[in-house]
Image (tube, grey):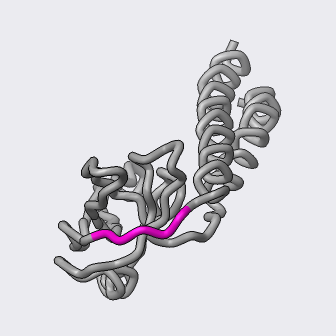
């Protein structure tokens, strides 16, 4: 019974990761294909920090982990219509950093009120992005999504 429960939990999580990875991989390719450079203005640029508590019950102590991510929003016009986006890269998988300084470094090219160039596929005008590079995030999600169900099945046999 433990094997089935383990498989359902981790296998289900793997399927979710696979779905997100595949949809983001397709979106990334679609956004990068036929993207055009247009002018934009940075309307928000700062580092967002998040702290999560970790409790180790065996050692009876708590620790915390803080991650930092660059948070940017920009406005642009297409055909007389104003749009706003928060995508640095052409997918929604956000890169986080262990130090605030590293996240601040990622925002250096995008200071508040700066005029920058963004990229947009005109068939998806609300999904503009600032850096025209394919990220590895979708592939990582796909690989983990494919590996988790068989690992869950194997581990479940010995729980």
Q: Which residue is drawn at 22% across and 73% down?
A: 46
Pick the quarter of the image with the C terminus.
top right
Q: Is the residue 77 above or below the residue 103 in the image?
A: above
The residue drawn where x is 50% and y is 54% is: 93
The correct choice, above or below, for 92 with respect to 156 in the image is: below
The range drawn in magenta is: 36-40
Q: Can residue 62 be seen in this view?
A: no
* Place of residue 10 in the rendered image (x, y in percent of width and height, measured from the top left): 63, 31
Instruction: Residue 43 in the image: state x and y as whole percent.
Output: 18, 67
Seen as rendered, the residue at the extreme top is 1
Name the residue nearer the viewer: 86 or 95: 86
* Residue at 41 percent of width and 59 percent of height: 87
Tell me the quarter of the picture where residue 34 sits. Answer: bottom right
Q: Does the magenta stretch include residue 39?
A: yes
Residue sitting nearer the eye, 7 or 142? 142
| x and y percentages locating residue 39 in the rendered image | 35, 71
In the image: residue 157, left or right of residue 37: right
- Is 13 a magenta residue? no
The mark total stands at 0
Dividing the picture into quarters, in which one does residue 21 lie?
Answer: top right
In what quadrant of the picture does the N terminus appear? top right
Nearest the viewer among 51 and 6 is 51
Relative to residue 159, is residue 131 depicted above or below? Answer: below
Q: Which residue is drawn at 64% across and 52% down?
A: 138
- Most common secondary structure along the magenta stretch: strand
**Looking at the picture, how far across and down is residue 63, in whole percent?**
31, 64
Residue 23 visible (yes or no)? yes
* Front residue of this view, candidates 143 and 133: 133
């Amino acid at each position: 019974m433990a094997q089935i429960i383990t498989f359902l939990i981790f296998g289900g999580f793997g399927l979710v990761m696979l779905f997100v990875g595949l949809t983001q991989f397709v979106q990334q390719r679609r956004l990068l294909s036929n993207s055009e450079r247009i002018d934009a203005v940075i309307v928000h640029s700062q580092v967002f920090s998040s702290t999560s508590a970790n409790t180790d019950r065996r050692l009876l102590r708590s620790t915390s982990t803080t991650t930092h991510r660059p948070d940017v929003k920009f406005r642009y016009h297409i055909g007389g219509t104003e749009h706003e986006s928060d995508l640095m890269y052409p997918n929604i998988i956000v890169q986080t950093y262990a130090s605030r300084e590293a996240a601040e470094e990622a925002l250096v090219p995008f200071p508040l009120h700066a005029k920058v160039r963004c990229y947009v596929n005109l068939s998806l005008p609300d999904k503009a992005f600032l850096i025209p590079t394919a990220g590895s995030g979708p592939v990582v999600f796909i690989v983990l999504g494919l590996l988790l169900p068989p690992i869950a099945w194997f581990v479940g046999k010995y729980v």
